């Protein structure tokens, strides 16, 4: 049964009805940003609430937690405050809750829902239902049955909001969940626990179980919208929308729902066939960039150097129309090869006294002022240590600006070590207090301001070790300590004018010819993303200043992903010796070595990840038929 929504950008249509969507089995809509998508979803929800209210009926909403729905809730709260949207006829059922879990615990979904929505709207407390993480083990089965019954008594879910986990879970229906499953307790998948680890300060603190609505509970909702933001979701989104229905990816059960829509941003949709390899779907409009992407893809898919691709290779892979445009594979191959060749430079600050029309950077001015923005105190060396080293060696004036203090990533025992060493030389009340504060801390406590200061200063000292090793004077190392980060907790404050002013100041002070920054879009709420947003805002505000006309911005990728080959606009090769110098610079960040606090899902040390990634980029260039280097760092230019 379909809900009547006013026609909107996300109104349901059957999937796969056009040629370009023929691989797709779930209706989906792609937005430029998660903000835009969230506003459309909030509109649909508010329309439904109002439509029900106008008929004197309740509106029964199934709600999700996690990072995905936060902006939808923000928009609903705004509509309540500014447009009089009332929640007095709204009844809600949340998808899930960790088990066991106290309601007052800040990690609980109970806490989350009140913090993001319920405390700010006029919903009747009796209309709110969230699975209870405190029921006893013996009572769980009965409790779950009663949860299902309550949904039925309210007439079923009119609307269900979902996120998607990287395991393909919806709610906490992990791989293996049956399509007929109802509300029940479930064991969380390891990947799900790893994804939640940073919120719980370590995977060992993440509960092993949860209570979740079942697949059938969700499928019975009259309308379903699933939100997916960011590159981290791209793989599971493709598997869900284009793959076969399978209990291994429980979200694929939504293919059988007649009124489900996925709302995504460009990053989450990036692996859909029509976006990633549109030539496999049907005719495409061949821009220069698309041709470049297609040819590098073809070369890798065929495991053949670009200059050896034949007309047949193109014809076999849906690119015959490209051949018609360009006349022969020979022409296309040469063009693509040259474009890639021109991305490679050992002169990331430009090569003095050399023709530069085919180089990524300008020759002039020969000595450039450069700011390297690093979200945490170590991303500079992890992500672009080789390029950093070269820029110094080639005589440019390099300023390093660490955007955040990175203090929460320092373990207590590191701060304790520093305080105890200081006290062992001469006991001071200050360091005695540091020791006392750390010893008094229990699992959920935030660090005292003093302990945060010690932790932040440890990271400063480590950074200075690395920048001195590369030969940067201390005056050119700037610790910005952006205030949005300084909450002492994993959850950060929103960006404010103070953050922007600090960024503007450093740019105005240095007047750089080059800015390097972390271009991480993978995580919609991660620190890297916020650090990029604040830079973009500063650039927007400063763009008319005379010195900005000469400023080029280069984006590197953080510790997690690398740019795709076809995106790279500057590739800086490294010799085996340079790889070792980079490794040594990373080693100065000792608190981030050997089992760090925020390891993420990748168990490798940061220096290992960096080396393997740089080696892989070099290897890809070699596979495409270009020169063979030990390692390469990659950059994309940002035009503001
Ligand atoms: C939350 C829930 C989960 C999340 C999923 C994605 O109530 O049921 O299925 O929607 O884990 O989480 P985020 O949005 O944090 O990526």
Image: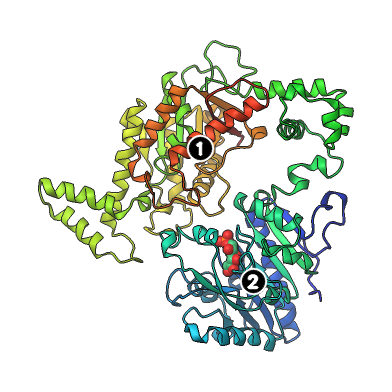
- Binning the other alpha carbons within 10 Å of mark 1 as few (below 14), some (14 to 19) or many (20 upward) gives many
Taking depth in this image into account, of 211 and 55 the one nearest to the observer is: 211
Disc nearer the start of the sequence (1/2): 2
Out of 533 and 507, give the one closest to the viewer: 533
Tell me: 309 left or right of 210. right
- SS assignment at label 2: helix
**Residue sitting at x 74%, y 57%:** 241
User: In which quadrant of this rendering is ligand 1 seen?
Assistant: bottom right
Can you tell which mark lies on residue 517? 1
Quadrant including the N terminus? bottom right
Res. 545 visible in picture:
no
Is residue 250 at least partly visible in the picture? yes
Furthest residue in direction front, as rendered: 176
The image position of residue 318, as x and y in percent, is 85, 37
- Above or below, 28 against 294 in this view is below
Label 1 and label 2: CA atoms lie apart by 39 Å
Occupied quadrant, residue 50: bottom right
Q: Is residue 461 left or right of residue 617?
A: left
Q: What SS does tag 1 mark?
A: strand
x 74%, y 21%: residue: 307
For label 2, being within 8 Å of ligand 1 is answered no
**Residue drawn at 75 percent across, 56 percent down:** 243
Q: Nearer the viewer, residue 475 or 595?
A: 595
Q: Is residue 290 above or below residue 501?
A: above
| Pair 1/2: label in front | 1
- Residue designated by label 2: 83
For residue 606, side relative to residue 94 (left or right): left
Q: In the shown orientation, is residue 600 left or right of residue 328? A: left
Q: Residues within 10 Å of mark 2 (few under 14, many from 20)?
A: few
Tell me where residue 492 sits by quadrant.
bottom left
């Amino acid at each position: 049964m379909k809900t009547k929504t006013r026609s909107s950008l996300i109104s349901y249509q059957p999937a796969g009805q056009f040629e370009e969507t023929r691989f797709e089995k779930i209706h989906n809509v792609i937005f430029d940003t998660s903000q835009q998508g969230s506003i459309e979803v909030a509109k649909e929800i508010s329309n439904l609430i109002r439509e029900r209210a106008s008929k004197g009926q309740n509106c029964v909403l199934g709600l999700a937690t996690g990072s995905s729905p936060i902006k939808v809730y923000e928009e609903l709260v705004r509509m309540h405050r500014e447009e009089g949207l009332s929640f007095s006829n709204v009844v809600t059922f949340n998808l899930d809750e960790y088990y066991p879990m106290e309601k007052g615990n800040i990690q609980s979904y109970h806490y989350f829902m009140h913090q993001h929505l319920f405390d700010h709207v006029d919903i009747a407390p009796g209309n709110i239902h969230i699975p209870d993480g405190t029921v006893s083990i013996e009572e769980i089965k009965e409790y779950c049955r009663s949860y299902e019954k309550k949904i039925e008594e309210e007439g079923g879910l009119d609307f269900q909001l979902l996120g998607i986990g990287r395991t393909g879970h919806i709610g906490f229906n992990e791989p293996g969940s049956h399509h007929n499953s109802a509300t029940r307790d479930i064991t969380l998948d390891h990947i799900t626990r790893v994804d939640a680890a940073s919120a719980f300060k370590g995977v060992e603190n993440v509960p092993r179980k949860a209570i979740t609505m079942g697949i059938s509970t969700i499928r019975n909702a009259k309308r379903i919208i699933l939100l997916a933001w960011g590159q981290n979701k791209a793989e599971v989104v493709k598997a869900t929308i284009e793959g076969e229905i399978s209990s291994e990816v429980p979200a694929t059960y939504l293919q059988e729902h007649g009124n489900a829509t996925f709302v995504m941003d460009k990053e989450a949709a990036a692996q859909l066939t029509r976006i990633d390899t549109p030539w496999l779907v049907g005719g495409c409009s061949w821009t220069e960039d698309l041709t470049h992407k297609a040819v590098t893809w073809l070369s890798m898919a065929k495991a053949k150097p670009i200059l050896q691709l034949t007309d047949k290779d193109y014809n076999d892979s849906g690119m015959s129309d490209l051949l018609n445009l360009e006349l022969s594979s020979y022409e296309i191959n040469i063009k693509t090869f040259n474009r890639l060749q021109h991305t490679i430079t050992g002169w990331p600050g430009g090569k003095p006294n050399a023709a530069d029309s085919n180089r990524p950077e300008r020759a002039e001015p020969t000595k450039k002022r450069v700011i390297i923005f690093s979200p945490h105190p170590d991303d500079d060396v992890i992500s672009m240590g080789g390029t950093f080293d070269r820029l110094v060696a080639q005589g440019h004036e390099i300023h390093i600006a660490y955007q955040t203090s990175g203090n929460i990533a320092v373990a207590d025992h590191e701060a304790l070590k520093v305080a105890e060493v200081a006290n062992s030389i001469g006991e001071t009340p200050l360091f005695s207090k540091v020791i006392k504060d750390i010893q008094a801390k229990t699992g959920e406590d935030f660090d005292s301001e003093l302990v945060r200061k010690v932790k932040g200063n440890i990271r400063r000292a480590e950074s200075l070790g690395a920048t001195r090793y590369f030969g940067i004077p201390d005056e050119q190392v700037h610790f910005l300590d952006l205030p949005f980060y300084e909450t002492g907790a994993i959850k950060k404050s929103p960006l404010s004018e103070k953050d922007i002013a600090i960024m503007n100041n450093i740019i105005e002070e240095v007047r750089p010819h080059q800015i390097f920054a972390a271009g991480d879009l993978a995580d919609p709420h991660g620190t890297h993303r916020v650090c990029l947003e604040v830079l973009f805002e500063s650039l927007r505000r400063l763009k008319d200043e005379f010195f900005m006309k000469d400023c080029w911005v280069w984006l590197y990728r953080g510790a997690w992903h690398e740019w795709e080959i076809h995106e790279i606009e500057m590739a800086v090769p490294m010799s085996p010796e340079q790889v070792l110098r980079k490794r040594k610079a990373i080693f100065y960040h000792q608190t981030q070595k050997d089992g760090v606090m925020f390891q993420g899902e990748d168990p490798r040390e940061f220096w290992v990840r960096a080396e393997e990634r740089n080696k892989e980029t070099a290897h890809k260039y070699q596979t495409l038929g270009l020169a063979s280097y030990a390692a390469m760092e990659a950059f994309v230019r940002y035009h503001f």
